[in-house]
Image: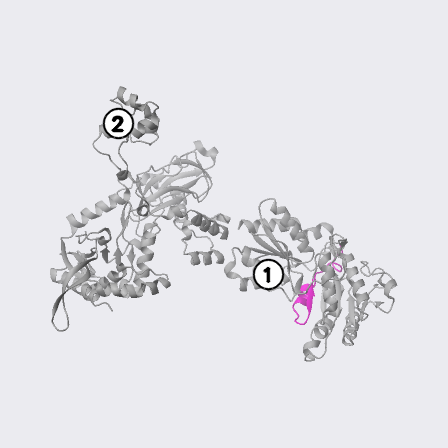
């Protein structure tokens, strides 16, 4: 009995996904819960496990294609079923349309063909549900271990009956994590090894490595300096000269995340919001002193007290003071959010992601610091759930971490504002003491900007927001 | 070390206790000249005489009642109930008198009584010679209920029972009387009452059993070991008081537990073990607590095929282990 592999729904608001990469090819044998393909949405990237043991009979959606959830991506079955396609007549392996929101980007089957296919459609949908979330029993010990180690059980392959995650599966997962720490090191924490750091072509090394009489080879064949090193070139040891000489650059296909960012930026700045930016300078002496005094205490509670946490608290206070910044333009009017859900831009090596600190206005400093640390860690580990990167009402971008003094970020639609935090540096400031005497002091300062949607808010509102932010940070208690 | 059968170990324990302590005596049906129907007292009548190895009338009530009276008079009686199936007439004496005497007399009177009873099925004994009666008595505070499964434990535990100041019900798995052999050291030793034994260490799951089922469970564990399943077998040895620490430690270690007993499933002793584990090791459990026991029918069937069907055996235990391991 062949089993369909379907595109799961990767979050409540996510209705489509892109097949990034097939990890198995037709004819490969697969084990249930073995990673089968990688899928990306504009919010998360994830591996889709095989729903059954067997052989990958066919791939229905090639890498790069974007389809609606529920679409049959592949078929798994016994080896003998190789020549028997599953839905050859009335149920082509096209995306589901009946009863679901049809997406423009998904190829739709016409009604005449989908109508008689009710039974396979049901099966496809059941498969989608199974792939979405593991619904089997979690035994007490597995629940306890998951809580103790803060594990996402969706990441652990189950080997128990009907795929149940057993205690041994959790232990094996933990062992694997312990013995393979290098996997968890982020690319930006590793020594530079990218193309930027490699010489384009090192002729002398290539020649020495490739031939015994390197010098004569180069003299006798100047037009093809690495002709004698063809094997090395094809093995990737040296870049292909043919490529670099025939084209002035190289084309990297767009990743789904890159395309999502691009679409969003163009839509936000060019087609949606008139952007205005205002900048304040903030003296962070009080914050720095407070952080120095409390960092160790927080660390004992397992919380890394970052400057970002202070900015989250200050921004939430600013949003409370100026509700029009915590709002949204709608055709019917301006929608004011009651809660402050603050998104926090996190840089990834292939783009960025904005996890949301929900109800940031209700958090105290330790709560904010804990949320910031948790979301940033999981963002870099790509372990965020789809709903954790949605629903923000305001965004903070901490561009200062890469040295930027101030920037004019683009608004994350449909929000009204985005706060940019520049690099903190010691600056010479003129300060006035309580007797009215001016003096020169060296103070840690940073530029804090607010870029906002001028349709919704005017300059005074933007400045009022930053004034509240500055007041809170300057007078931090 | 000499190798003994289970019944030889029982005989050896009584022989040595009779020799060690002149207060010790044996009474029961056919225990004298005949040496007991299972030969548990063979030779003791000749060796110690009719005053210390005493044939009784066919009346279990009086066997136990005489034992209680003698114990109160500071003797150390060993009462034999020929088959545990016959113990029911003595239920009142055991439960109402022996078990409660110490409590009722506010610690003034003790009943240092041992009641030995061959129990369990598998010998084609039919309804009147196959019963498991441990659950009735393990319910009664004031009693100790001991079930050895090896000759070593049988001898050591019986000696502890004789020396215990309170009443001990000593249940001997008669199917194993001659089937179970094992090394028993020369000389005096005891095995403490109230301690379970890890009969076979393992990592994947725990099988709790006692008596003949402990023996079968070890064989089942050996069978599944060839398939890569590493089962731990805990021989409970004492049902009352139960060695909760060992039971729970093993459950917490493996997370999967199977309790095997040859009594009827419902309200059998395994239910108490299951409840204990559910109560105190819940957060370590990786599977439902499983019991393998005899079906709830009125008696152990006489027909050989039906008896085979009725009793758990190494094959059915191994199947239950496989099922649990796969969960």
Chain letter behind tag 1: B
Q: Is residue B2 left or right of residue B141?
A: right
Residue range in magenta is B124-146
Which residue is nearer to you in this view: B261 or A292? A292
Q: Is residue B251 left or right of residue B300?
A: left
Is label 1 in a helix, a strand or a loop?
helix
Q: Does A466 sit above or below residue A261?
A: below
Q: Does A87 sit above or below residue A134?
A: above
Residue denoted by label 1? B247
The structure residue drawn at horizontal position 31% and vertical position 63%, both measured from the top left corner, is A295
Kindly indicate the quadrant of the structure image that contains residue A446: bottom left
Chain letter behind tag 2: A
The structure residue drawn at horizontal position 69% and vertical position 75%, both measured from the top left corner, is B100
Task: Give the image location of residue A307, x and y in percent.
Answer: 26, 60
Which residue is nearer to you in this view: B6 or A78? B6
Q: Does B216 sit above or below residue A104?
A: below
Task: Give the image location of residue B35, x and y in percent.
Answer: 84, 61
Characterize the local packing of mark 2: few (<14), some (14-19) or many (20 or more) Cα atoms within 10 angstroms.
few
Q: Is residue A23 visible?
A: yes
Is label 2 in a helix, a strand or a loop?
helix
Which residue is nearer to you in this view: A6 or B206? B206
Q: Main secondary structure of the magenta part?
A: loop
Residue denoted by label 2? A242
Task: Give the image location of residue A60, x and y in percent.
Answer: 36, 37
Task: Give the image location of residue A79, x and y in percent.
Answer: 47, 34
């Amino acid at each position: 009995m062949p089993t369909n592999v379907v595109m799961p729904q990767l979050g409540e608001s996510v209705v489509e996904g892109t097949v990034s990469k097939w990890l198995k090819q037709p004819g490969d044998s697969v084990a249930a819960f073995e990673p089968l393909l990688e899928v990306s949405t504009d919010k998360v990237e994830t591996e889709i496990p095989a729903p059954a043991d067997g052989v990958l009979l066919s791939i229905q959606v090639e890498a790069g294609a974007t389809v609606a959830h529920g679409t049959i991506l592949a078929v798994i079955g016994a080896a003998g079923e190789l020549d028997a396609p599953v839905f050859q007549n009335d149920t082509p392996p096209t995306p589901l349309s009946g009863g679901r929101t049809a997406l423009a980007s998904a190829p739709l089957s016409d009604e005449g063909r989908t109508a008689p296919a009710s039974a396979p459609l049901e099966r496809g949908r059941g498969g989608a549900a199974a792939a979405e979330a593991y619904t089997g029993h979690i035994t007490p010990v597995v629940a306890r271990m998951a809580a103790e180690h803060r594990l996402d059980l969706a990441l652990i392959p189950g080997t128990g009956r009907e795929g149940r995650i057993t205690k041994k599966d959790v232990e094996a997962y933990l062992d694997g994590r312990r013995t393979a720490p290098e996997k968890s090191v982020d690319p930006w924490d590793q020594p530079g090894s990218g193309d930027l750091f490699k010489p384009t072509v090192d002729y002398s090394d290539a020649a020495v490595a490739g031939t015994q009489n390197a010098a004569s080879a180069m003299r006798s064949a100047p037009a093809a300096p690495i002709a004698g090193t063809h094997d090395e070139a094809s093995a990737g040891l040296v870049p292909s000269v043919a490529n670099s000489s025939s084209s002035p650059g190289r084309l990297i296909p767009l990743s789904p995340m890159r395309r999502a960012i691009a679409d969003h930026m163009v839509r936000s700045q060019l087609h949606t919001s008139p952007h205005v930016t205002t900048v304040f300078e903030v003296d962070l002496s009080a914050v720095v002193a407070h952080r120095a005094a409390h960092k160790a205490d927080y660390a004992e509670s397992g919380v890394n007290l970052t400057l970002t946490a202070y900015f989250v608290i200050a921004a939430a206070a600013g949003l409370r003071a100026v509700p029009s910044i915590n709002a949204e333009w709608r055709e019917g009017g301006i929608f004011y959010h009651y809660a402050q859900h603050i998104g926090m831009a996190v840089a990834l090596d292939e783009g960025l992601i904005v996890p949301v600190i929900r109800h940031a206005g209700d958090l105290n400093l330790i709560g904010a610091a804990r949320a910031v640390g948790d979301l940033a860690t999981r963002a870099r580990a790509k372990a965020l759930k789809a709903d954790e990167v949605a629903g923000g009402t305001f965004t903070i971008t901490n561009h200062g971490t890469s040295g930027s003094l101030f920037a004019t970020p683009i608004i994350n639609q449909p929000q009204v504002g985005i706060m940019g935090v520049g690099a903190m540096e010691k600056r010479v400031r003129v300060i006035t003491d309580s007797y009215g005497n001016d003096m020169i002091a060296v103070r840690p300062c940073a530029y804090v900007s607010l870029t906002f949607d001028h349709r919704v808010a005017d300059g005074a509102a933007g400045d009022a927001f930053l004034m509240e932010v500055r007041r809170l940070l300057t007078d931090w208690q | 070390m000499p190798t003994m059968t289970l019944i030889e170990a029982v005989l050896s324990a009584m022989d040595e206790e009779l020799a060690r302590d002149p207060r010790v005596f044996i009474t029961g049906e056919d225990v004298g000249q005949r040496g007991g129907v299972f030969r548990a007292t063979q030779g003791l009548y000749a060796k110690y005489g009719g005053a210390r190895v005493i044939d009784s009338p066919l009346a279990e009530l009086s066997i136990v009642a005489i034992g209680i009276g003698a114990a109160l008079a500071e003797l150390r009686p060993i009462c034999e109930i020929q088959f545990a199936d016959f113990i029911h007439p003595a239920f009142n004496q055991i439960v109402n008198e022996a078990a409660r005497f110490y409590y009722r007399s506010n610690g003034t009177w003790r009943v240092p009584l041992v009641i030995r009873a061959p129990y369990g099925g598998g010998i084609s004994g039919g309804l009147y010679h196959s019963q498991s009666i441990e659950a009735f008595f393990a319910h009664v505070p004031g009693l100790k209920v001991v079930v050895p499964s090896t000759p070593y434990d049988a001898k050591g535990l019986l000696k502890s029972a004789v020396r215990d100041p309170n009443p001990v019900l000593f249940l001997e798995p008669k199917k194993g009387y001659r089937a179970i052999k094992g090394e028993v050291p020369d000389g005096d030793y005891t095995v403490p009452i109230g301690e379970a034994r890890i009969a076979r260490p393992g990592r994947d799951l725990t099988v709790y059993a006692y008596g003949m089922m402990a023996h079968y469970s070890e064989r089942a564990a050996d069978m599944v070991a060839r398939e890569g399943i590493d089962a731990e077998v805990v021989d409970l040895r004492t049902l009352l008081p139960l060695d909760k620490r060992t039971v729970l430690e093993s459950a917490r270690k493996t997370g999967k537990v199977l309790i095997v007993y040859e009594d009827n499933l419902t309200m059998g002793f395994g239910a108490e073990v299951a409840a204990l584990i559910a109560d105190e090791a819940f957060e370590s459990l990786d599977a439902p607590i499983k019991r393998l026991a005899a079906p709830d029918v009125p008696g152990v069937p006489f027909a050989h095929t039906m008896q085979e069907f009725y009793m758990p055996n190494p094959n059915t235990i191994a199947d239950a282990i496989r099922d649990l391991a796969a969960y």
